Image: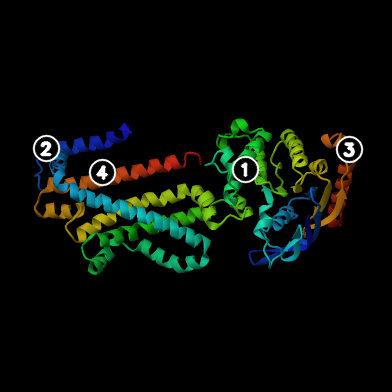
Amino acid sequence: MAELLVIPGLALALWQILVMALDVPQWQLPGPWEILTAMVEDFSSLRAHLLTTYGNVLMGFLLAVALGTGLALAIYFSSLVGLTLTPFINIMCVVPVITVVPLLMLWLGFGREAKLIAVVAQSFPVINLNALSAFSNVAGPRLELLRALRASRFQTAIHCLLPSSIPGIFTGVKLAAVLALIAEVTGEISGGDAGLGAQTIKYTQFLKMPQAFACVFYVAAFGAIFYQSLGLIERWLTRDH
Amino acid sequence: MIELDKISKRFRARREEFLALSDIRLRVDDGELACVVGPSGCGKSTIIRIISDIIKPTSGRVKVDGITFDNSAPAPRETIRRMGFVFQIPNLYPWLTVRENIRLPLVVLGLKGRSWLDYADYLIGRADLSDQADLRPQSLSQGMSQRAGVVRAMVHKPDILLMDEPFGALDEGTRERMNLLFLDIWRETGMSVVFITHNIEEAVLLGQRVYVMATGPGRIVESVRVELGEREARTVEGHLFAEYVSRLNGIIGNVELEKTV
């Protein structure tokens, strides 16, 4: 784990040296030290925004996991559900969230709901498509045991489909984590004054670049930790696969 | 009693239909161990999937203890619950321990209570898997995995056991030990068994009746009653045993010859 920090540490050190050596003005590009100082000093004023962004991402992401996997099971078991939903899911997969956020805000206002919907809409299709592909690739003989026992669809999902498909599902889940964060910050930038996205815009307008970068760093740190944590959960869940 | 009456099965592959089974008539009495032997692709495995109603026949009927089912009437759940299925590859789930794998049918069928768990443990001991029961199946040998697959099929105390070349992937020595262990367990439980194999010696060793199948389309060409003495039933070297093997080889040889003429 420590070796993972060596390269980013060196890059930050180089950044700091270049900013100092070239005497780059702080309003153009602050050094990592100034950003780190802003992260610590402004933590109390940013705390509410951190909680807004992180909370929305986590909640939207969890909803997307449930929706994406649940719909994948429904599509797997019912071709009628598949025929009905798949075209919409495919379209949602390719439409960038930034194009729909203004519409969501028009309908729902600048509050939490529009951003939450944006997060779910952006992240669940990728989970759905990967989960569906993983279910379809479960080996027939694995399922045959449950078929021979006349297991219900629910039992088949719990005892075989879901455990067999964890690696495939997690491919989508990890992508969805990144997309969820992008959707949330995009939503915050598009309107409203809560969240790290909105704060980045506010600080940039006042040329408070260390604070603006502090917000970006908080987003990036969360994204990196979130992604790595999902990787660890995946490794733990697939330890016997 | 299991009865297959004029069963035929057509499969469709790439817009083409082919006849996999034709006019299959087969009968297994209560407590009988019947083997179905034949070359690869003759539809042996399809037969037991039709008995267990995993595959629907195109025509014909299956009768299990007086309950009839066919391509329009599915087998009642209760009838299916009285069957156990042993697969060629045991397919133990790697995320469960050996014990959890063996208990899985109990969970799926909703059979709760100490007596069921005790019976599962008894079978685990009977199959000599007690030391491996809490390990993951990845650490088992092929023979151990197959033993686990056999006891998993028996854990819900079925009256009928359907076995699809269960020992086909094992080496000669392990297969022989598995056959003898299985014979002991079968005598203990008195189940009706349909045992699919392509190995004639295995069919003679295990079966009280052997159905011989041929390909193109899959059909039963002969049914042979096997009556080995107790001593010869424990070895593959007796005179009578060799006679049966030779007779079955002759039947299969004749069918192959007819096909080439």
Amino acid type at image mark 2: Met
Residue underneath mark 3:
B229
As displayed, is residue B75 above or below residue B137? below
Q: Earlier in the sequence, mark 2 or mark 4?
A: 2
Subunit that carries the residue with mark 4: A
- Pointers 1 and 3 within a single chain: yes
Which type of secondary structure does the marked residue at label 3 adopt?
loop
Residue underneath mark 4:
A221
Q: Is residue B93 left or right of residue A227?
A: right
- Pointers 3 and 4 within a single chain: no
Amino acid type at image mark 3: Gly
Q: Is residue A224 visible?
A: yes
Q: Residue at x 56, y 44 (%)?
A: B93
**Could you tell me residue B42's position as x and y percent?**
75, 55
Distance between the alpha carbons at the discs numbered 4 and 1: 51 Å
Q: Which of the two marks, 2 or 4, is nearer to us in this view?
A: 4
- Pointers 4 and 1 within a single chain: no
As displayed, is residue A106 above or below residue B173? below
Q: Is residue A34 left or right of residue B149?
A: left
Distance between the alpha carbons at the discs numbered 2 and 4: 24 Å
Residue underneath mark 2:
A20
Residue underneath mark 1:
B116
